[in-house]
Structure formats: C-alpha cells, structure tokens
Image (cartoon, helix red, strand yellow):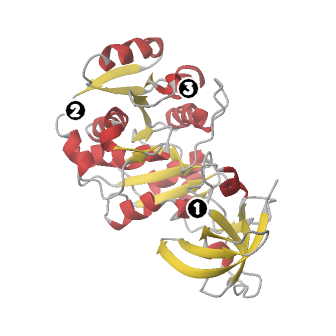
Amino acid sequence: MITWRRGEVTAIRRAWRGAVEVTVAVPEPEPARVVRAIAYPHLTGTPEVGDAVLLNTTAQDMGLGTGGYALVVALPERLPADPPAGPGHVVKARYTPMQAVVLGVDEQDSPHHAALSAADSLDGMPVVVADLHSALPAICAGIRAARPDARVVYVMTDGGTLPLWFSMTVDTLRTHGWLAASITVGQALGGDLEAVTLHTGLLAARHVERADVAIVAQGPGNLGTGTRWGFSGVAAGEAINAIATLGGRPVASLRISDADGRERHRGVSHHSLTAYGRVALAAADVIVPALPEPLATRVATDIAPLRARHRIHIEPTEGLNEALQSSPARLSTMGRPLEADHAYFLAAAAAGHWAATHLPT
C-alpha cells in the first residue's frame, strides 16, 4: 500500500505557510533518480540540505494527483524536538502513523469552548459550497467584486488533502487579505482553527472569526471513480444540509464546463447534480451565471431537476471576468487556466457575488 524510499535533500525549492518543497536524491532502487517532495514542518520538522529523509512515493510513482510530489514522512537522523506541553487533545489523521494532536476550537481546553457550547445558529450567514478546491479563489473574487470589505472565512472539509498546508492557494489568499481565516474540520488539519465537525467549524467561522460569509470546499485532490456516488465531492450536498440545520443560507456553486474532455462533467457536472439534487435535502440558493449560447441552454436543461427543491438564480456576470483576472492566486482546474475553462470559474465567481449581495442586515 505504501512505496517507501530513502533519500537525501539536495535543495530547498520554495516554501509557503506550513509547507516546504525540496529536491531529494533517491539512490535506490537503481537507476538513481531525483524527485520533488513536500514536507510539512509541523509534522516532520524543517528539512535542510543534506538531511536524510524517508519518503512515501506511492502516488507519485503511480502518477496520481498529489501535485507530482513525494511526501516526506520523517527526518530520521534529525528528529524535531518534542512539542511544548499545552492545551489541546483533539487527534486528527487518527490511528495513522502521522496522527497529530491539535487544539480544537470546540474542545474543553479551548478559550472558545463556552461560546461554541451556546452557539446554535449562523444567523442567516450565506455560506458558498463548492465541489472542488479550485473554485475557492474564484468565489473570493466574486465576493470582493460586490463587497471588498466582507470578512471571508474558508472552512476546509476532509474529502481531499488533509493538511491545509498543501494549498498554496490558501496561503496566497491569506497573504493578500482575500481570506480572513481558515478552519479545518473532520480529519483535515492545519487551519487557523481546528474543529471536530463541519457544524462546529461553521459556527466557529461565524462566532469566533466573525465571518460575513463563509466558503465550504474540500482541499486539493478531489477523488472520483467515474460512478454516480463514488466521488469525494458528494460532501457538498451534506454541507448544504449542515448549513441549513444551523440557520445559515446555503449557496450552491455549480461545477460548469464546456472544456472538460469528459462528457459527465460538461454542462453542469454530474457531481453538482448528484450532490445538490440527491444528497442535499435542504433547499439552497443555486447560482447560475448568465452564459452565452449554446452553453446556457444546456445548463438550463441540466439544472431542471434541481428546481423542485432549490431556488435557482440567474446571476449577471458583468465585471466578474475582471474580478477573476485580479485574483492573486493562480486560477487552474484540472490543469486548465481561466482562459481555457472560463465557464467553470465564472460559475464560482457568480456564486460568490450573489452571496456577497445577500448578507444579513
């Protein structure tokens, strides 16, 4: 299940919040090779040139979607110091060799425990839900186009990457002030706040981080099997239910494309239709960008089954292209940039724009 390799760090390539990218020489098995690897210093310590490393190269060897990285598991000859004693007993990545203890915002040791014990409502806060992590900067662009002063908090679920540190997008959006904070829920870890469930993560976004609007999406690395139910984005429908249960306003961002080579993702992706049409039992505001023909007609046909439960809104797109082009984070989905899959990013921006114009008074 895991391909292990030993290597030596030969270069530090770059670093961002919570992550370091390195070059590692792997001598065995022959022929020797050089690989790109990523380390999370909070888990492994900070790698330096000359360090021996243990790597997990499984996904890289198989060509799977981990960004082309091997993963640093340990620096066996230079272990990090023991973490300082402190509050927190929530274990994430539980019962794996890399399980880590964090301070949960909702646990008894947290200074926010009392507030979250009493919290039971999002007070009508709009929460934009998306299938893919790549929608995040586009949603933020739409929000900022309408309300540049809005306080936006990202709630990352555990359907994709578990360490939020993997995401250069989040680091860039935080650095430029497009995101006020991040919260990791479930088995995901590495956010500004840690929460045990999506429900407490949403409540923390509202009552601890004072969000005007929140965004819920999985981290990078969507998992899909080409079947109706076998994809990690099914959790988008469950997020709609959680938001409605807590008295928030669920806003559904559609996954739309006229560039994806897979028919099941053209027009409105089957991921959106399954998550919002079958899994989401609560009503949401489903945002459809005004699109050119013939894509507009196809999208209208695709979303027809959603009308029985949800509120469908056609959102004008004036100014959204400029907003998308201003994103400090790179816009890319499945390797396609903004100009190659414009409808995808426009749909996400439209959802953010609609949410920002419907903040509670």
Contact, CB < 8 Å: mark 3 with mark 2? no
Q: Secondary structure at mark 3?
A: loop
Up the image or down, 311 lies above or below 354; here it is above
User: For this view, does 317 lie left or right of residue 110?
Assistant: left
Which is nearer the N-term, disc 3 or disc 2?
A: 3
Q: Amino acid at mark 2?
A: Thr
Q: Dot 3: within a 10 Å radius of its alpha carbon, few (fewer than 14), some, or many (20 or more) residues?
A: many
Q: Which mark is residue 280?
A: 3
Label 3 or label 1, whichever lies nearer to me, is 3
The image shows residue 293 at horizontal and vertical percentages of: 26, 17
CA gap between label 3 and label 2 equals 26 Å
Q: Amino acid at mark 1?
A: Val
CA gap between label 2 and label 1 equals 37 Å
Q: Which mark is residue 60?
A: none
Q: Which mark is residue 317?
A: 2
Q: Secondary structure at mark 2?
A: loop
Which is nearer the N-term, disc 2 or disc 1?
A: 1
CA gap between label 3 and label 1 equals 27 Å
Res. 145 visible in picture? yes
List the residue tagged with mark 1. 105
Q: Which of the 4 image quarters holds residue 178?
A: bottom left
The image shows residue 2 at horizontal and vertical percentages of: 80, 58
Label 2 or label 1, whichever lies nearer to me, is 2
